[in-house]
Image (tube, rainbow, N blue to C red):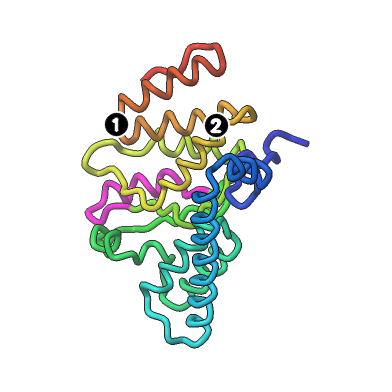
Amino acid sequence: MKDAEISTLDFTLPEASSSGNEESIKLKTLPSNIRDLLNQATTEVEAAIRNLEQALESDLIEDTCWQLLAYLYLGANRMDDFSSLDRRYEETFGAPIFVNIPQERSQLNPDRVIFKMPQKIVSGSLPDITSVQETCASSKGTVLDFSRVHGADTNGLKELVELFSQLPRDQTKPEIVAIDRFISSLGKAADDTTGTQEMWGMLFEYKRFCNDIDAFDDLAIKFAMRFDISPPSW
């Protein structure tokens, strides 16, 4: 199999999070009262999901309830259900579900040009960098929306690094929406024994984009210890 075909990061795959066996082992090591509380919480979350799903089918559900159901799906690692809900929400309201969360909506200029990142970042799937740069320089400004991203392959990560490396870093820099989950999952995947240098490369580039020197330095130390080579420079 060619390297470009290897899925290096997929939030929908079991390996993107702790395995069921590992979770079971961790639970067994907890005190019985804590296990009981966790089991009770899990039962209540599942009941809440069922109730919200039923309300959704009755068309009596408010916008905030859609978002609550989305959060519950994410917390329960039910990514297929989340994706289906997100698609249904966009068909109904004309925007991805988390773009319409009040605190994010208040920060977004409705006139900005929004580039929606693909569900899986692969070679050729990213927006044209020239178009992004042009909209950044315009009076409207730019938003890169990561709310749909569920995974990336090796070549996709390479192209994402290239995209971020060419984004402006001054007052015209684009706003990045809903990227936290992607970066968090990428960091966990990079820390794993199967983590690749492409994953680390994207983490480094994102720290540069955020002008977070301290986090970059911490990442560099981990990289040097992991690969026994000099890390990238700032």
Quadrant for the C terminus in the image? top left
Q: From this viewpoint, is residue 123 visible?
A: no
Which residue shows up at 30% across the image and 48% down it?
136
Above or below for 179 versus 91: above
Mark 2 secondary-structure assignment: helix
Instruction: From this view, report whether residue 68 is shown above or below residue 170.
Output: below
Q: For residue 25: magenta?
A: no
Q: Which mark is residue 159?
A: none
Q: Say the numbered circle drawn on residue 211.
A: 1
Is residue 37 in sight in this rendering?
Answer: yes
- Looking at the image, residue 192 sits to the left or right of residue 205; the answer is right
Sort mark 1 into few (<14), some (14-19) or many (20+) by Cα contacts within 10 Å. few
Residue 139 within the magenta-colored segment of the rendering: yes
Q: Nearer the viewer, residue 210 or 109?
A: 210
Q: Amino acid at mark 1?
A: Asn
Disc 2/disc 1 C-alpha distance (Å): 21 Å
Q: Please report the bounds of the magenta region as a residue range.
A: 126-142
Residue 90 percent location from the top left of the image: 46, 71
Percent position of residue 222, x then y? 47, 20
Disc 2 residue type (three-letter): Ala
Residue shown at the point (53%, 71%) measured from the top left: 47
**Residue beneath the point at 48% across and 45% down:** 182
Quarter of the image that includes the N terminus: top right
Which residue appears at 50% of the width and 58% of the height? 74
Question: 41 or 144, which lies in front?
Answer: 41
Looking at the picture, how far across and down is residue 76, in whole percent? 54, 58
Please identify, in this view, whether the residue under mark 2 or under mark 1 is nearer the observer: 2
Along the horizontal axis of the image, is 166 left or right of 78? left
